[in-house]
Image: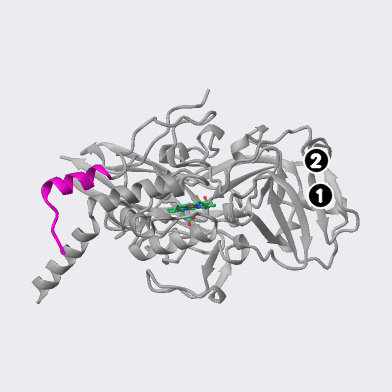
Amino acid sequence: MRYLSRRQLLAAAAAMPAAAQSGSLTVPGKAPLIVHNDFPEDLESLPEYLASWITPTDKFFVRQHLPRPKIDAGAFRVNVGGMVSTPASLSVDDLRKLPQLTLAATLECAGNGRGNFQPRIPGLQWNKGAIGNAQWRGPKLKDVLARAGASAQAKYVDFDGADVPVGKVPEFIRSIPMRKAMLETTILALEMNGQPLPDLHGFPLRLIVPGWDGASWVKWVNSIQVQAQSNPGFYMATAYKYPKVAPAPGGAVKPEDMDVLEGMAVKSFFATPSPETKVKMGSTVRFAGIGWGGENRIARVDVSTDGGATWRPAALGKEDMAFAWRTFSFEWKAARPGYTVVCCRASDAAGRTQPIDAAWNPSGYLNNSVERLGIVVEG
Amino acid sequence: MKRALVLLGFAAAAAAADPAMIERGKAEETRSCGGCHGVRITRTQRLSRGNWEKELDKMVRWGATIKDREAILEYLVATQGDDRPRPTPEISANGAR
């Protein structure tokens, strides 16, 4: 047992990671984003990027598990096999010849908000910006499955991308059940916001599973396998699971007591103003944000300007549909001086409402706690 | 009694933060953690000792080769422990046209 001298303490401090710097990394095609990792890139949107209904592609968050593959669009093929009558190998041109659907849908990482759970949880320490809303366009998955003659007995469809694991890291393979695969709204996107998908977002082909966690939206899809069962690999059997019964915060949950994550939770947050904004007493403050309910449309968003004691409805944006978030705004006259806690709370058409505190879970998924934004009213 | 426990706790933390060990741990991180992903993913975490132990086990299962496990663990706990303040977010420069 010994105590450190002041000099030793200073030496220990010097060994700490360098203070985060601004602008040491530039990602081609991307506006300034919060960097969680550089290789492969994991990038979070700044809250103010999320005030508009469509998130521009350059401001859209990025999440990658494995190093990004280099893809030659001309040579690219997606193979459709497993429980099918005629295995198919389709080029980008073949996919373009199928009827195309354009669909607005919100993509959110299952772990968005993980960084705000206590006790802390390993994984990307997202604040609130691992989410965005875009227009996706491409053929319906059901048409692609029909091309290969998928068996009516099949229960799941597996998706694998062209990304390759390093070392003994498992393949990133995800399955979705047939009931979701066969919906008119489950598509294989070739385009994002009217342009071919950028590399970072899965060029040339990405699965769109509206209302479900981002992990299901497999990028660089080059293999589609029709199956009797969900994939037994790590990314279906172990990762992306949520406890059937909430453990005490920090507690362990046995694998058999977990379910595969599917639809996302109802949530809302403020895009602007930013936390701790100072406003003059008597001025009118405009709050803007989004509410979204996974597979359900948003029915209402309420705002409280007294820390949750009383609530009033926010004005909702005109774009009102399942799968895509809904914008809201709220104007407030700052009548009293002092620190004011402003909260927002969304409710969806299925009657779900946000909790004050989301249930802690071992992987830090579905954080939909009511947001508390501090505003300083100067007298 | 309470005071003795507090002193014991402090001594344990101080002993854990041996600067030479921390230096060795940092070098071990550079050597064994940068091959599959950037070290930013480790430096943005704030985890308990128990969670860092589990992360090291997971990375070894996935193919990491750690030579100096004691040092890397002490380094991670001392610099990226759950009692450390959250890092200031790093913002990338503008790469959009």
Question: Which residue occupies the extreme top position in the image?
Answer: B97
* Mark seen at residue A213: none
Residue B44 visible in image:
no
Q: Are marks 1 and 2 in contact (CB under 8 Å)?
A: yes
A289 sits to left or right of A92:
left
Classify residue B30 by image quadrant: top left
Left or right? Give the position of A156 relative to B78: right
Image x and y of residue B86, in percent: 31, 49
Residue at the location (43% across, 49% down)? A126
Query: Residue pushed farthest right?
Result: A86
Amino acid found under the numbered disc labelled 1: Val
Q: Which residue is mark 1?
A: A144
- Marked residue chain, label 1: A
Taking the spot 90% from the left edge, 54% from the top edge, the residue there is A86
Residue at mark 2: chain: A
Pinpoint residue B33: horizontal percent, then vertical percent: 45, 49
Residue B7: x and y in percent read 12, 67
The residue located at (79%, 41%) in the rendering is A77
Q: Which residue is mark 2?
A: A95
Q: Tell me if B85 is positioned left or right of A228 in this view.
A: left
Task: Establish if A38 lies above or below A299.
Answer: above
Instruction: Using the numbered discs, state the Cα–Cα distance from disc 1 to disc 2 in whole angstroms.
Output: 8 Å
Q: Give the class, few, some or many, for how many residues have Cα within 10 Å of label 2's Cα (few <14, many ≥20).
A: many
| Range of magenta residues | A1-15
Of B51 and A74, the residue lying toward us: B51
Asked if badge 1 and badge 2 are on a common chain, one would say yes
Which secondary structure lies at badge 1? Answer: helix
Residue B27 visible to the viewer: yes
Amino acid under label 2?
Answer: Leu
Q: Quadrant of the N terminus of chain B?
A: bottom left
